[in-house]
Amino acid sequence: MRPLALFSLGLALVAGLPGLARAQYSMITDPPSRWAWSGHVATDFRMEFETKSDAGDEFDAWRSGIEGDVGGPINQSVLVGFAARYAFSSFDFNLDNGAPIVFGGTRLPREPWNTINTLDLVPHATVLVGDRVSVVTTVPIRWAAENGADRNAFAGGISAIVRWQVNDDLMVGAGLGVTSQLARNAETFPILALRWRIDESVELRTEGDWLQGGSTALYFGPSEAVRLSLRAGYERTRFRLDDYGNAADTDGVGEITTVPLEVGLRLQLFEGAHFDFRTGLGVAGRIRVETSGGNKLYDQRFDPAWRWSMAIRIPIGSGERAGKRPAN
């Protein structure tokens, strides 16, 4: 199967899941090493250029994040680990539209939010069932809020996935997650994992985390040192708003969703460490503002937005690659 055909398959998977799962799903990738304690640290930055909603409201945004993960065996059949991530997002709205100062129309009456802080904590455990099958469970916790928010901003749940290492080149996994939502009922959603090394120059894989969204990525190139990539995904973030002013969105909830379509370049710094640069479009985006009880105040699509991002990932310890036994 040609690389572009494989990527089209992954794109169809990404495009179809949000509606199936009520706009939520997760895609994850490598399990922890079963041979030694290991992990990684990473940092990333993303810029999203100005876009306009169907109602004419304009905004742009940038985001920076840092994350880390560590895990390993406590006996021959059980692995444990812990992951954490912090992200800072800044939004800049241009609302020179003469809208009234209260919600009620299609236009935003004022800047709904500015800076958003998101903290994810993810303890996880893996039970090994023979050499090829593992069951992973986790209790992901997220706190996401605008600066100055003083109401509950936590969401948490429980997730599990069964992974099957079919052979040395193919790993597949499927599972379910349940998580609470700010000002909404809890949601149940599918979790998918795939890593398929088709040959020495082509790899198809899912990337993401336990909490929300993810992407399908196709890497291809002449060597591990330099790889090009095609990527399609889904992003969704809900967060608590502050109590600024006395508008209807005081202590409310904000939400941003988009489908990124990107091309990229990956440079290997050393084994297990890499630098990524990606650029592309965020399409099918929506911006939403709700009251503290979850009632809609504003819900508009926005135009495709150009974006670029860069990230660095550095391994910690041995056994960085899943299933790779450290050299003696």
Image (cartoon, rainbow, N blue to C red):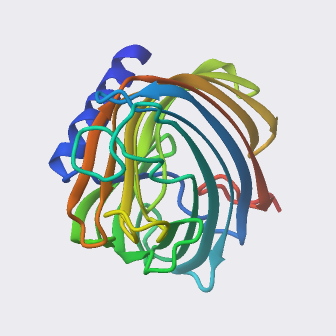
Q: Can you tell which quarter of the image residue 1 is in?
A: top left
Q: Closer to the camera, 270 or 240?
A: 240
Q: Can you tell which quarter of the image residue 323 is in?
A: bottom right
Q: Can you tell which quarter of the image residue 260 is in?
A: top left
Residue, far bottom: 75
The structure residue drawn at horizontal position 21% and vertical position 56%, both measured from the top left corner, is 296
Q: Closer to the camera, 25 or 218?
A: 25
The structure residue drawn at horizontal position 34% and vertical position 71%, both measured from the top left corner, is 160
Q: Quadrant of the C terminus?
A: bottom right
Q: Position of residue 192 (x, y in %)?
A: 34, 52
Marks counted in the figure total 0
Q: Closer to the camera, 158 or 86?
A: 86
Residue 290 as seen in the image, left or right of residue 236: left
In the image, residue 144 above or below residue 309: below
In the image, residue 221 above or below residue 247: above
Q: Position of residue 203 (x, y in %)?
A: 52, 30
